[in-house]
Each structure stands twice: as structure tokens, then as C-alpha cells.
């Protein structure tokens, strides 16, 4: 059923002709010369989403959780390397191939769609393409720092294939420009489930909020977050339906999900659900971080086990399927609670602490927790910002945000040094994979890993 829904959802918005069904799979087409009709333009954008699926099926957790304090692991390979902070140029999560595949497909779409599809429809397709390019570069900057900035498709042997790394601030400038274009040109709504798996104006504003917070541009972050909070597409789920955000997807709290089905699958089960053999399980520190009476606790992991291994947040309380088969669940990349808590952070930074606490308390009340005033927040967590970040740790647990939260707030070393010895700011980025270095003589390895 989910496979059928996903196919209908994508092709109903990205196809106006049955001709698209006769084309080769987008994942294998030669982009040069592909764009000739409106159907090609639609298929090209679908191909970008296809690349996004591949990029995040495993790495959303490796990049966003693997180096942070909420998880532990018994597995070798990337899970252990990331947890112990022994990164090298050969680990799989150091590869940026899939990110640049997404960027490449977006660059073709951005260049050629205006030549075959004009008017508002063409602009909204380009808006989606630019937003997905921005999403890709945003991850690249947060993972590797300075990265090659490529905004044109490769179509000639005369083009320079060996692009040097670009200063991360210039890349972030391009990200902001792409997202501002998406805000202006993407549709407000596609209707129904499509609003969760395609980039809408709300999705672009939400991603802009995250970019602004990364840049510590709190005024702009507050303004774009406000546009999300005032968007009628989004509302918080009740605690009784909280698990549905992840188990069934397509809820009103979701802003952007990466859609999967029985054919296009991800690794959620292997990452979190295999009990004694999953990549990750809740760390002792995470389990000891809950306040009493938090209604989310038993929705996140198996609290009945003495040494809990199952993170069943993505599959439902009591999930007891040990199959290592891939998952067809969507990955919820951005949701309303995330943006609300970022807005609370921004407001606190702007000196509007009471308004920040009001937003924080909306999330706390849903979880069955008492409201905090400033004195209580300070008494419990040291300051209001720490109270908000603690709430992000619990509410957004295992969704791929924790490591980036620690880095952007300057807390990664303080939090992780007692766990794995992290002590050098140069170590906050990943190494560039040796394959990329071997292919491009103009790339320089991040200094910590030289």
C-alpha cells in the first residue's frame, strides 16, 4: 500500500503524461540531452529526490547521531569509529559521492528546465531543484567544512573537473540564495501526502531557519521560523499520536520527509530496531537524561529491558521484529517541533527569554512535563539555552540532529571529550574520503587528518 501511495504521490505531481512511464529509470539516464519536454523536466526533478533517498538512507544517522552522546554501539565499522572518534579517510561516512550526485542532478535541472517549461510550473520545479541542492550543500558544509561549490552541470571535456574547495561561508551564501528562490517559487501546497515529501514554501522556510541558526543569524532565523509556525499546513501532534510521526508518516507535524517504499528502502531497522544487533542503542547518558513522568520515554526505547537495545521510536512501542530487512518507513528530516525549539533558541539569543520559554513549554506540556520559568530552567539546566537544548535531545532523539546541535552551539568538545576524548576543533569535521582525494589532485585533506 505504501509503495502504491508513494508512486501515486510522486507521479501525480511530477507527471502530466504517460510518456514518463516509458523512459529509462531516472537513476541511470544520461542527463545531457535529456531535457526536451515538460515530462522530462518533471522526471528530472523526480530524479533529484531519488538521489536524496540514496544519500540519507543510512547517513542521516551516521552524520547526525553517530558522533554524539545519545547513542552507543557494539558494531564495528562506521558505528564504532564514529562513537570512538577514530575517523579516517577510508570510512564510508566520509564519502560525499551521493551528495554530489544529488547536486549534479539538481544542476542539470536548474539549467535546462527553464528551456523546456516556462511560467509558474517551471519556476516551482526549479525551486524544488534549488532547495534540494541547498539541502545537499548544507549537509556537506556541516560535515566537511569547505567543499567544492559546483553550480553548473558538467557537459564538456573543456570544463575544469578538478575543482578546489570553496570557503564554507561562500557555500552557505549559495545555500541561502537557493532557499530564498525556493521560498518565492515553490508551491504553498501540493495537497495531502505530497506536502510532506516534496519541497513546499514551508519546507524551504524551515530549512532556511536551520541554515540561519547554523550561521548564528538569530534575527533571520526567528523570522523564517515564524513563517513556518504560522503556516496552516503544520501543527503539533498530540502525545497519543506522537509515534505516528515516524511510524506511518505524512502527519501534520511533518515538514519534509524523505519518502521510501518497499522498493526504495532505507536502513532504519538495521540502524535502530534489531535489538542486540542494531547499529545503535540508547546510551546510559541518554537514558539518564529524562525527567520523571516524561510520556515520550517508553515511546522512544524499550524501557522494560535492563540493558535496552531497541530504539522503537520509528516502529512503534513494543516493536518486536528482529528481521534485518530494509525499512520502507519514511525518514522525517524536518518537523514542526524542531523549528519551534530553534525559534525558542533564537528568541533567547535575542533577549526575548519569556517568549522562548513559552515555546519550550508547549513541547514540554505535550510530553506531560511541567512548565518552566526562567528560575526553574536555570536551576535544572544552568541556563535557558541549555534547557532548550536538553529538550531537543529528548524530543528529536535519533532523528539526526544531535551532533549538529552540539557543533553549532559550541558544546561538542565539552560533551564528547569525557566520552571519546574529542578535544580539537579541527576534529569536528569529517575527513575527505581517499577516493575523492585520488580523483581530484586539487583537493586538500582537512588539516586534522593530514
Image (cartoon, grey):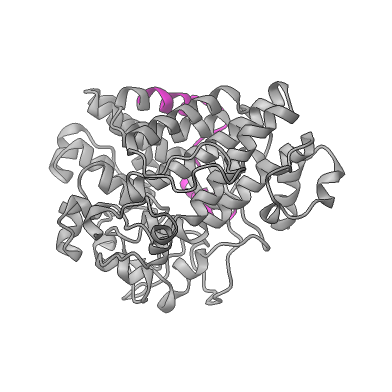
User: Does the magenta run of residues contain 423?
Assistant: no
Q: At which x and y percent is residue 353?
A: 23, 27
Where 306 sits versus 185, above or below? below
Between 349 and 340, the residue placed more toward the observer is: 349
Where 273 sits versus 183, above or below? below
Between 399 and 153, the residue placed more toward the observer is: 153
Quadrant assignment for the C terminus? bottom left
Q: At which x and y percent is residue 390?
A: 27, 47
Report whether residue 359 is seen. Answer: no
Q: Is residue 403 left or right of residue 302?
A: left
Q: How many marks?
A: 0
Between 271 and 375, the residue placed more toward the observer is: 271
Q: Which stretch is magenta?
A: 222-248
Q: Is residue 435 left or right of residue 86?
A: right
Q: At which x and y percent is residue 177?
A: 46, 27
Q: Is residue 136 left or right of residue 427?
A: right
Where 304 sits versus 49, above or below? below
Q: Residue at x 29, y 65 (%)?
A: 87
Q: Quadrant of residue 281?
A: bottom left
User: Does the magenta run of residues contain 237?
Assistant: yes
Q: Residue at x 31, y 69 (%)?
A: 81
Quadrant assignment for the N terminus? bottom right
Q: Residue at x 46, y 28 (%)?
A: 229
Residue that sits furthest to the front in the current view: 158
Q: Is residue 55 left or right of residue 111?
A: left
Report whether residue 237 is seen. Answer: yes
Q: At which x and y percent is residue 270?
A: 49, 70
Amino acid at each position: 500500500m505504501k509503495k502504491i501511495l508513494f508512486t501515486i504521490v510522486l507521479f501525480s505531481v511530477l507527471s502530466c503524461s504517460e510518456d514518463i512511464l516509458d523512459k529509462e529509470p531516472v537513476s541511470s539516464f544520461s542527463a545531457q540531452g535529456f531535457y526536451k519536454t515538460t515530462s522530462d523536466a518533471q522526471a528530472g526533478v523526480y530524479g533529484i529526490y531519488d538521489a536524496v533517498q540514496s544519500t540519507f538512507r543510512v547517513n542521516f544517522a551516521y552524520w547526525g547521531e553517530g558522533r554524539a552522546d545519545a547513542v552507543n554501539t557494539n558494531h564495528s565499522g562506521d558505528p564504532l569509529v564514529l562513537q570512538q572518534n577514530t575517523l579516517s579517510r577510508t570510512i564510508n561516512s566520509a564519502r560525499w559521492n551521493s551528495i554530489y550526485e544529488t547536486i549534479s542532478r539538481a544542476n542539470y535541472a536548474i539549467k535546462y528546465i527553464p528551456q523546456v517549461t516556462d511560467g509558474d510550473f517551471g519556476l516551482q520545479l526549479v525551486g524544488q531543484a534549488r532547495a534540494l541542492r541547498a539541502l545537499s550543500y548544507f549537509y556537506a558544509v556541516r560535515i566537511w567544512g569547505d567543499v567544492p561549490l559546483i553550480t553548473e552541470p558538467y557537459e564538456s571535456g573543456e570544463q575544469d573537473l578538478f575543482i578546489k574547495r570553496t570557503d564554507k561561508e561562500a557555500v552557505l551564501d549559495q545555500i541561502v540564495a537557493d532557499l530564498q528562490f525556493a521560498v518565492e517559487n515553490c508551491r504553498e501546497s501540493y495537497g495531502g501526502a505530497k506536502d510532506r515529501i516534496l519541497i513546499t514554501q514551508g519546507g524551504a522556510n524551515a530549512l532556511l531557519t536551520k541554515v540561519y541558526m547554523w550561521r548564528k543569524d538569530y534575527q533571520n532565523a526567528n523570522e523564517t521560523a515564524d513563517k513556518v509556525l504560522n503556516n496552516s499546513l503544520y501543527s503539533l501532534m498530540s502525545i497519543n499520536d506522537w509515534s505516528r510521526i515516524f511510524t506511518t508518516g505524512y502527519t501534520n507535524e511533518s515538514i519534509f520527509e524523505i519518502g521510501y517504499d518497499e522498493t526504495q528502502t532505507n536502513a532504519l531497522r538495521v540502524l535502530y530496531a534489531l535489538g542486540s544487533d542494531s547499529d545503535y542503542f540508547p546510551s546510559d547518558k541518554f537514558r539518564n537524561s529524562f525527567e520523571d513522568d516524561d510520556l515520550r520515554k517508553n515511546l522512544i526505547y524499550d524501557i522494560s529491558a535492563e540493558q535496552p537495545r531497541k530504539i522503537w521510536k520509528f516502529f512503534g512501542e513494543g516493536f518486536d521484529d528482529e528481521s534485518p530487512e530494509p525499512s520502507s518507513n519514511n525518514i522525517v528530516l524536518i518537523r514542526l517541533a524542531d523549528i519551534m525549539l530553534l525559534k525558542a533558541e533564537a528568541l533567547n539569543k535575542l533577549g526575548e527569554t519569556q517568549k522562548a520559554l513559552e515555546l519550550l513549554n508547549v513541547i514540554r506540556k505535550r510530553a506531560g512535563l511541567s512548565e518552566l520559568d526562567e528560575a526553574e530552567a536555570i536551576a535544572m539546566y544552568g541556563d535557558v539555552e541549555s534547557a532548550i537544548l536538553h529538550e531537543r535531545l529528548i524530543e528529536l532523539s535519533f532523528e539526526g540532529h544531535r551532533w549538529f546541535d552540539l557543533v553549532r552551539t559550541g558544546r561538542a568538545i565539552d560533551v564528547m571529550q569525557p566520552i571519546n576524548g574529542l578535544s580539537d576543533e579541527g576534529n569536528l569535521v569529517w575527513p575527505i574520503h581517499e577516493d575523492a582525494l585520488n580523483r581530484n589532485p586539487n583537493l586538500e585533506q582537512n588539516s586534522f587528518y593530514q
